[in-house]
Image (cartoon, rainbow, N blue to C red):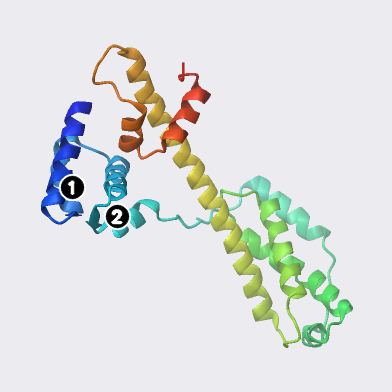
Amino acid sequence: MNVQEFQNKLKEIQSVARENENSLTTAQIRDTFAGLELDKSQLLGVLKYLTSQGIQIEGMEETAAEETKEPKYKKVPLTPEEEAYFKDYLSELPELSIDTKQAFAGLAEGNQEALQALTAHYMKETARMAADMNAEEIFLADLIQEANLSLIQALGEAGTELRDEKWLMGEVRKGLIRVLEEQTQRKFADDSLVARVEKLESAVRELNDDEDDKNAFSIDELAIILDMKVDEIRDVLRLTGDDK
C-alpha cells in the first residue's frame, strides 16, 4: 500500500464527513478506500480512527460487534489417552448410594454431613458431564477439576432453599460453560495477538528492506492501518529487536 495514497484517502473521507455534518456511513468509507483493498481489521482501524476524530459513523456498532464477537467453545471427542484417564478416574471413585431427597433436605438445614454426602455422590456424574463437554482449549483432567469445584461451590452456596439434582447439575453445567468460554476466549485472544504481531513484523520487514523510502510507514501510520496502539507496536518492535 502506498502510504501517501492512504493519507490522501483519509483526508478525502474526512472532507466528506465535514460536508455531512461530521457524519459518515460505513458504505461511504468502504467506497473511498476500495482501491486500497484494506482487509477487515484494517478497515475497522480506519473506522476507529475516524470516530476518535469526533466523526459519527452509522453502522459502526454493528461492524465492531461483528469483528469482536467472542467464539463459543466447540466440543470434541475424547482421545484414546483421555478415554483411558477418564476410565481410571471413575474407577477410583467409591460407589455410594444415598437418599438424595433426604440429603438435599439436610443441606437446606445446614447439615455438613449432607453436604459431604452429596459432594461424594455426584462426583461421578459431574466427571461424566465434563467428559461430555470436552474441548480442545482445556485438558480433560483440568475440566473435571473445574466440575468438582463447581459442584462444591454450588452446594456450599445452596442456602436454606430446598434444592434438587436438577438444580445442582444445572449449576455445575453453568460453571463448566463459563470456564470453557473463558478458555476459548483466551485462546482466541492469543491467536489474534499472534496474527497481529506477525502482521506487524511483516510491515517492519518491509520498512527494513527499504529504509530510504519516503513512503515508509511511521509508527503512527502503522497504528491506524493495523488497528494497534502505538505503545503496543513499540512493545512488539522491542520484542523483535526492530526498535533500533
Q: Nearer the viewer, residue 173 or 98?
A: 173
Residue 151 image point, x, y percent: 72, 68
Residue 76 image point, x, y percent: 54, 53
Residue 1, visible in the rendered structure: no
Residue 161 falls left or right of residue 11? right
Q: Residue at x 83, y 58 (%)?
A: 92
Residue 147, visible in the rendered structure: yes
As drawn, the residue found furthest toward the right would be 113
- Helix, strand or loop status at disc 2: helix
**Residue under label 2:** 63
Height in image: 105 above or below 228?
below
Graded by Cα atoms within 10 Å as few (under 14), some (14 to 19) or many (20 or more), the crowding at tag 1 reads many
Distance of mark 2 from mark 1, alpha carbons? 12 Å
| Amino acid residing under circle 1 | Ile
Identify the mark at residue 70; answer none if there is no mark.
none
Residue 176 falls left or right of residue 67? right
Q: Nearer the viewer, residue 171 or 226?
A: 226
Height in image: 225 above or below 4?
below
Q: Nearer the viewer, residue 192 or 78?
A: 192
Residue 130 image point, x, y percent: 65, 61
| Amino acid residing under circle 2 | Thr
Q: Residue at x 69, y 62 (%)?
A: 147
Graded by Cα atoms within 10 Å as few (under 14), some (14 to 19) or many (20 or more), the crowding at tag 2 reads some
- Helix, strand or loop status at disc 1: helix
**Residue under label 1:** 29
Residue 109 falls left or right of residue 14? right
Q: Residue at x 26, y 15 (%)?
A: 213
As drawn, the residue found furthest toward the top would be 212
| Circle count | 2
Q: Residue at x 30, y 35 (%)?
A: 225
Give whichever of discs 2 and 1 has the lower sequence position.
1
Residue 47 image point, x, y percent: 27, 47
